[in-house]
Image (cartoon, rainbow, N blue to C red):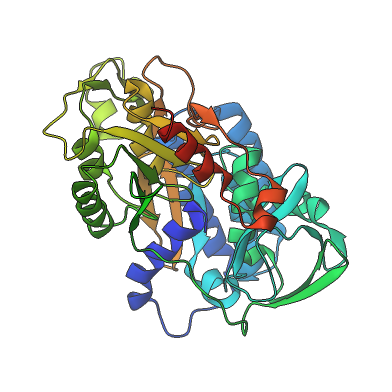
Amino acid sequence: MSRIQTTVLLLLSIFFSSWPSKAQDTVSRLDRILTATKIYQRVTTFFPDLSPTQFERDYREYLGHILSSSDDRREFDLLSMAVVATLHDGHTWFFDQWLEKEHGQSVGFAAWPIGGKWVVVRSGIAALRTGDVIEEIDQTPTGLYFEHNRKYISASSDRDAGVSFFDTPVLFPERFVLTLDGNRHVTIDRAHDKKEEPSVKTEGRLLANGSVGYIRVPVFRGIATQAQALEYFSGFHEAKAVILDVRSNPGLGDAGVLQRSLMDKSYQVWTEHSAMKGGTLLRHLGNANPESVELTISGASARPADPVYKGRLFILIDRGCTCACESFVGPFKFSKRAQLVGETTAGTYSATNFTQFENGMMLNVASVRHTFPDGSRFEGVGVAPDVEVPTSIESLKAGRDIVLDRALALAAER
């Protein structure tokens, strides 16, 4: 599950309790205009590196569509998703509770573009196996299907959009057929398929005849997963190394407790840039009445506390490590406290401004642009591993974890 979809589901668990039992499947012309106006205001106020000319152009086209469209709510939702997606930011998205309720059943699996093919990397459906190559969706080549729907996916890069594609279920029919390599066909029935959900509990065990500890943290929501990880670290104090696996961790919380408990040296933190346009603050700064105020924080460093674990540390990362997960692993890269093994992270991380409209629609807008401590771009780039181990179709089909194997080999070197 991608960071966007997982974040949305978390928010829905909070807000659905107040959602009207009979939501309207139409949106009047007046409500379309009002919602569009709110989108414009939030984006132009908070989005940190907005290109005004380009957004004005995209927004004008969006207005033309919604003014001439019908009252169909799904059509309006997709148009709104598309205009927000023009900002190319994984944390800036439009969402509608009604759309999720009516058309948002999970597809039950995740597939990423690997080696020019769309490959299943995780499946909760018995007929669909990890490593299967999805060649067609309802007889349309998968790559072409993605291209047709790319405009609706809020992502910081095309690579990031590829990760989020199958985690955006509103883009798919309720029932569709996958054509797989080997001329196999699997029918996905989103409303009726039995799906096995991935575990969100922290796991730990000893590997390599008890000489290497392994801890997997699937999410940072709340404190429970971090507390369990720290218990494992305390129990692995005699291990020659510990491997911390945060692959496909969507963040969803503050990982600072675990991060501080593993740091044994000072380290630089992210450079942050934010901007605010309009508002009371700007009108009272002086006679000049500036159009915007910008704030940049750079050169800051953090001091370690008393770490729980001071031994050799390897962290497994991939393109599914996003948001708070990237905030977590970044300082380990900056300080060289750990070796990062795997593939580059998603490249999308930001504090956001979140708004829920009265009609059940939502808008999330990135409000802070993070860069690496040296000022180089992070968004759309991600945190690169120290030791790159690309995901391969062959290893997925064989059920081999080549990233973990490489980390174990590194741990055995001394």
Q: Is residue 106 left or right of residue 277?
A: right
- In the rendered image, residue 42, in percent from the top left (x then y), is placed at 42, 44
Residue at the left extreme, as displayed: 306
- Figure quadrant of residue 337: top left
Reply above or below: 24 against 317: below
- In the rendered image, residue 46, in percent from the top left (x then y), is placed at 40, 37
**Nearer to us in this view, 100 or 21:** 100
Q: Locate the C terminus by quadrant.
A: top left
Reply above or below: 337 against 348: above
- Figure quadrant of residue 329: top left
**Nearer to us in this view, 40 or 153:** 153
- In the rendered image, residue 377, in percent from the top left (x then y), is placed at 49, 22
- Residue that appears at 23% across and 59% down: 224
Q: How many marks?
A: 0
Q: Is residue 191 left or right of residue 202?
A: right
Q: Is residue 2 visible?
A: yes
**Nearer to us in this view, 273 or 182:** 182
Q: Is residue 177 left or right of residue 226?
A: right
Residue at the front extreme, as displayed: 209
- Residue that appears at 11% across and 34% down: 306
Q: Is residue 63 visible?
A: no
- Residue that appears at 61% across and 69% down: 73
- In the rendered image, residue 372, in percent from the top left (x then y), is placed at 41, 22
Reply above or below: 121 against 299: below
- Figure quadrant of residue 227: bottom left
